[in-house]
């Protein structure tokens, strides 16, 4: 139970820090002219969908953890409801671990894959 609290606190802090950085606008260099421009077009939409999906997955998992905690506290000692609440919490934690693993794999292969910067082709 103690490790569950530590994992929940760590995930909560990581979500909050991610939200705090969500208002930053990525300014990307424009290769032909050297000017800077905000990523737009199809690349901008893909980046937005990717980031939104990660945040949505994190929020849904956090909501599932909270819902499982509410079920746990209201189970009243009923073993079947308690087991269902534990299963919900563990499933949400596994989902968060899966999200983190997917991000880390992309970041390990190439950090530009995780941040989704536009590809710059040499001339």
Image (cartoon, helix red, strand yellow):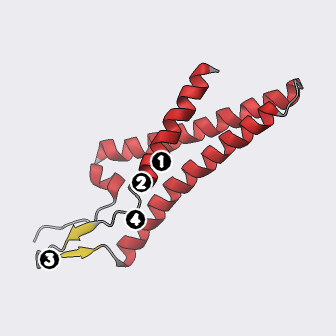
- Which of the two marks, 4 or 1, is nearer to us in this view? 1
Q: Mark 1 points at which residue?
A: 16
Say the numbered circle drawn on residue 47: 4
Residue 6: image quadrant is: top right
Q: Could you tell me how far apart the alpha carbons at marks 2 and 3 are, in whole angstroms?
A: 27 Å
SS for dot 4: helix
Quarter of the picture containing the N terminus is: top right
Residue 62 image point, x, y percent: 61, 44
Q: Which residue is drawn at 56% across and 56% down?
A: 56
- Say if mark 2 contacts mark 3, CB within 8 Å: no
SS for dot 3: loop
Residue 14 image point, x, y percent: 45, 42
- Which of the two marks, 4 or 2, is nearer to us in this view? 2
- Which of the two marks, 3 or 1, is nearer to us in this view? 1
- Say if mark 1 contacts mark 2, CB within 8 Å: yes
Q: Could you tell me how far apart the alpha carbons at marks 3 and 4 are, in whole angstroms?
A: 20 Å
Sequence-wise, which precedes: disc 4 or disc 1?
1
Q: Residue at x 52, y 41 (%)?
A: 12
Q: Residue at x 39, y 41 (%)?
A: 104
How many C-alpha atoms fall within 10 Å of the one at disc 1: few (<14), some, or many (≥20)?
Answer: few
Residue 8: image quadrant is: top right
Q: Could you tell me how far apart the alpha carbons at marks 3 and 1 are, in whole angstroms?
A: 33 Å
- Which of the two marks, 3 or 4, is nearer to us in this view? 3
Residue 28: image quadrant is: bottom left
How many C-alpha atoms fall within 10 Å of the one at disc 2: few (<14), some, or many (≥20)?
Answer: few
| 2 left or right of 102 in image | right
- Which of the two marks, 2 or 3, is nearer to us in this view? 2
Say the numbered circle drawn on residue 20: 2
Sequence-wise, which precedes: disc 4 or disc 2?
2
Q: Mark 3 points at which residue?
A: 35
């Amino acid at each position: 139970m103690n490790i569950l609290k530590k994992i929940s606190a760590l995930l909560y802090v990581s979500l909050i820090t991610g939200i705090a950085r969500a208002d930053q606008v990525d300014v990307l260099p424009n290769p032909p002219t050297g000017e800077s421009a905000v990523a737009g077009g199809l690349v901008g939409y893909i980046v937005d969908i990717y980031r939104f999906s990660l945040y949505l997955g994190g929020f849904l998992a956090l909501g599932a953890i909270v819902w499982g905690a509410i079920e746990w506290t209201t189970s009243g000692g009923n073993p079947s409801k308690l087991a269902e609440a534990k299963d919900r919490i563990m499933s949400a934690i596994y989902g968060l671990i899966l999200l983190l693993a997917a991000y880390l794999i992309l970041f390990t292969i190439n950090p530009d894959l995780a941040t989704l910067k536009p590809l710059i082709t040499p001339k």
